[in-house]
Image (cartoon, grey):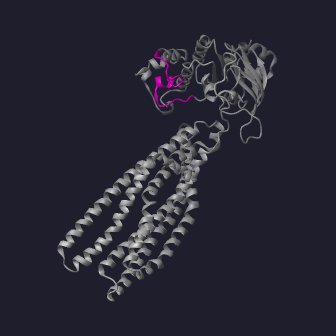
Amino acid sequence: MIKILKNLTVYKWMVAAIFVLVFIQSMSELFLPTLMADIIDKGVVIGDIPYIWKIGGLMLLVSAFSAVASIAVSYYSSKTAMGVGRDIRRKVFKHVESFSMQDFDKIGTASLITRTTNDITQIQQVVIMILRMVLTAPIMFIGGLIMALSKDVKLSLVIVATMPLLVGLIFFVLRKGMPLFKAVQKRIDGLNLVLRENLTGVRVVRAFNREKDEQVRLGKANEELKDVSIKVNKVMAVLMPSMMLIMNITVVGVIWFGGVRIDSSAMQIGDLMAYIQYVMLIMSSLVMASVMFIMIPRAAVSANRINEVLEMVPTFLDEGTLAANKERATLEFVDVSFTYPGAEEQALSAISFKAKAGEVTAIIGGTGAGKTTLVNLIPRFYEVTSGTIRVNGVDIKESSQAEVRSKIGFVPQQALLFSGTIEENIRFGKEDATEEEVTHAAMIAQAEDFIGGMKDGYASVITQGGSNLSGGQKQRLSIARALVRKPDIYVFDDSFSALDYKTDAQLREALVDETKDATVVIVAQRVSTVVDADQIIVLEGGTVAGIGKHKELLENNGVYREIVESQLSEEDIA
């Protein structure tokens, strides 16, 4: 929690102003009961009307000071808390951007969303409370105690008798509530996970008529959160009524014994009234403290979860900065092996090949052969377990991740578009791309026809995830996004699967001239897509089963021939 609160140092002058204002507010509230006692003892009892007006006016002025200070405290504490929340959220997001895919897998996307939203909101709430109460509570407690003792020392024994009850109650609630707060945040993670999966996979859920099953799954997660939340609220529900009961018993005790003191002329009526007010202030300060003691542990749980993300060292960091290219547009794998974290078997084993500028390297294999895993290693989404990957003759570990990725035009297996216009999505590959470059990339990607058919053309809005486009249209825009970048290496991870054969052929033909100075890596399921490649890498079980051209592999490689025979007729093969 302390690490998170260090973010307040940026707002130190605002915090100092808040503390000054809190002090003014507290002093004003502590002064009012004494003025009230003077009005009763020196004005009402004696019947001195001018004195009542004089002190009454002073009370109004002090109250106004207190009100203005209170409003200012609320405004500046809210402004500070929102600023701290914004800063922490920015830090978390910036740090998460440096995570590798295995780091995301470790924490989980749903949990990261919860930590960036709900957990930071908890921090904001407690910062507001700390700024408003951390100084107010002790000033009101100590000041109220001093002023109460100044009115009557013996009557203060009533407070001494009830204080241990309040303190004991606070610690009891604290001990019971802390584990439950941790459970609540975990349950929120679980609920977010189910919601996210249902929203992103709504088509699959509906296609298989699993709505009722998913409702049951969501209901279970919701029920678990409800049960823990009820337990937390039960503990919290005990606190306020119990504290109010103790406070009221204390006030009754003060009035009882105060009446006895007045009857014996040891105390005046005004002093008793002021004393009751000071007792209420003392008790209120303890209520404030109890609320802080409850909120701070809950926020501490959130702070620990945020710190866990901020302190998490990415699986791999840049070891270099800008390494000079030794070759132009080349990709080389040297004895590369890779194992997913926690997996027992290697996903890739001893992969070696070299792809040169102007060549098309195709990767083909059965499901689970390791095709997507292989191409995910090129932009360093994952770190190789052993071996070396060289881009333009430079080991990718010796160059910064940004530098490596700047040389790659990556088209993922699942086309992902962002909300915005078509033009903005294509420009995502190159922010400063000209209008001509955007239209040229769309033309090569065979996307110009359907873009032209849309009402607003390149200004047409794409909904979240590209849900208003077909699978083939999304793939073509993803390809255009990579083409506009004009990288040294193009990586197409099964990016033509949603295209019909005619569009596929036209696209591959258009790519020949466009990528003649670059290295092209194509992962494909269709034999027709890879048949003209300069070299075809056949993967089986994470290892290279063969490398060569179509005819060569067809004659000498059983794995490749089996794939070809499963897709083409004997006439086509011949």
Q: Nearer the viewer, residue 71 or 401?
A: 71
Q: Which portion, as a residue range, is magenta?
A: 415-435
Q: Nearer the viewer, residue 451 or 352?
A: 352
Q: Is residue 220 visible?
A: no
Q: Position of residue 225 (x, y in %)?
A: 54, 55
Q: Is residue 369 above or below residue 354?
A: below
Which of these two is toward me, 203 or 197?
197
Picture coordinates of residue 464, whole percent (x, y): 48, 33
Q: Nearer the viewer, residue 251 or 21?
A: 21
| Image position, residue 175 (x, y; %) | 57, 65
Query: Would residue 473 be visible to someone looking at this image?
Result: yes
- Residue appearing at x 74%, y 40% in the figure: 343
Is 430 magenta? The answer is: yes
Q: Is residue 25 left or right of residue 453?
A: left
Tell me if 61 is positioned left or right of 121 in this view.
left
Give left or right: position of 415 versus 40. Answer: right
Residue 52 at x, y percent in the picture: 21, 72
Would you identify the image quadrant in which residue 342 lies?
Answer: top right
Q: Residue shown at 51%/66% (left/top)?
A: 235
